[in-house]
Amino acid sequence: MLPSDLTLLAIESSCDDTAAAVLKDGHVASSVVAAQRIHEGFGGVVPELASRAHQRLIVPTVEAALEEAKVDKHDLGAVAVTYGPGLAGSLLVGLSFAKALALGLDIPLIGVNHLEGHIYSVFIDEPHPSFPFLCLTVSGGHTLLTLVKEGFVHEELGRARDDAAGEAFDKVAKILGLGYPGGPEIDRLAASGDPTFRAFPSPRLPNKDHRKSYAFSFSGIKTNVLYFLRDLGETERKQMLDGHLPDIAASFQKTVVDALVGAIRDAVKETGVESVAIVGGVSANRGLRATAQAAADKDGFELFVPAFEHSVDNAAMIAVTGAFKLAAGQSSELTLAAEPALKL
Ligand code: KG4
Ligand code: ZN
C-alpha cells in the first residue's frame, strides 16, 4: 500500500520529541526519536525549553535517520513535516528545517497534520485495519474518537472538551507525588491496586438529544482526586498515600478506561463499523488494552493497537501519512505556516 518507488524524509517536532524517519522501498527504514529529558523536573513540557532543544537536536536526529536508512539526502524524493497542531515554537523548528531542505534539494514539501499522523500510524505495522475504521486517539495532547471512512475522509464523533486523557494521567500522577510523565507510573501501580477502592466521576459527558455522546471532560476527575486528598488533612493524607496509592491509581485508571472503552462500544454499535484502532501514548496503558480487547471479543469487533514506538509521538507516522498524501496528489507550498491549533 505504501509507494515503493519513493524515498521520503519525515520530521516531527510538535511537542517535546524531536523525531525523524525515512521511508524507503515501501517501508519505514528508520525512525529516530530524541526525547527531551529537560522537562522532567518541571512536571510538564516547558514550551520555551522545548523549542531550544529542537534547535539543538534537529540536525543530529535527521542525520541519524538518514544514516540508519543508508540514504543520502540527495536521494530524497520528498520531505514531510508536521505543521500543526502543537507548540508554535516547536513546530517552527521542524517546519523551517523541512522547508530549507525542500528548497535546497528541489523536492516536494508535504505538510502533515499531527492528528492525521496518529490515525495513519495504524498503517506502519501489520496487520492494519481497512477502511472504514473507528480510531480513538488518546495522547498527552488529544482525546478524539474519529470515524475514518476512507483515506483523508474523517468524521469526528467526539473529543475531550478540556484536558486530554494523557494529561489527566500526568496531572493525577503529579497530585499523587509521582514523576512525569505519570501515565506509565499509574499504569504500573494500578496493576496491584483495587479498582473498586473509590468511585470517581466518569469523564464521559452525558448524552444529548437521545444521541450517544462521545464527548469527554477529564478536568472533573482530576479535581476530584485533588479534593479527595486535600480534604483528608495531613496525617490521614499521608496514611492514605502510604497505604492505598495502588488502589487510588487503579480506581482512577478504571474510571478513565471504562469511559473510553464505553464510547468505543457505543460507536461500534451505532456505526456498525467493526474495526477499531487505538493510537497515541495512552494506548500503551495495559488496563486500556485489556479492557478494549475484552470488549472486542465480547462485541465481535477487531482491535488494532500499533507498536508502542509508533503510538507515542514519532516521525514514522508522519512519513506514512506524507507518502499517502503525495500519492493522492497533495503537497504544500513553501509558504506553509505552522498552525498550533490545527484541527483534524
Ligand atoms: O502520544 P504521546 O507520546 O504524546 C502526545 O502526542 O501527547 O503521549 C504521551 C502521553 C503522556 O500523557 C503519557 O503519560 C501517556 O501518553 N502515557 C500513558 C502510558 N504511557 C504513556 N498513559 C497511561 N498509561 C501508559 N502506560
Ligand atoms: Zn501526539
Image (spheres, rainbow, N blue to C red):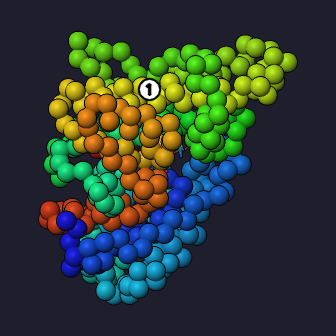
Height in image: 164 above or below 184? Answer: above
The residue that disc 1 covers is 258
Q: Residue at x 31, y 30 (%)?
A: 298
Residue type at tag 1: Asp
251 sits to left or right of 310:
right
Residue 329 sits in quarter: bottom left
Q: Is mark 1 within 8 Å of ligand 1?
A: no
Height in image: 341 above or below 84? Answer: above
Q: Tell me if mark 1 has few (under 14), some (14-19) or many (20+) residues whose alpha carbon lies within 10 angstroms of its own.
A: some
Q: Residue at x 38, y 87 (%)?
A: 72
Q: Residue at x 59, y 44 (%)?
A: 184
Along the line of sight, which residue is nearer the eye, 260 or 151?
A: 260
Give the image location of residue 305, x and y in percent.
38, 49
Which quadrant, please, contains the C terminus? top left
Residue 142 sits in quarter: top left
173 sits to left or right of 68:
right
Visible in this render: residue 261? yes
Visible in this render: residue 147? no
150 sits to left or right of 304:
left
Along the line of sight, which residue is nearer the eye, 95 or 188?
A: 188
Give the image location of residue 343, x and y in percent.
31, 42
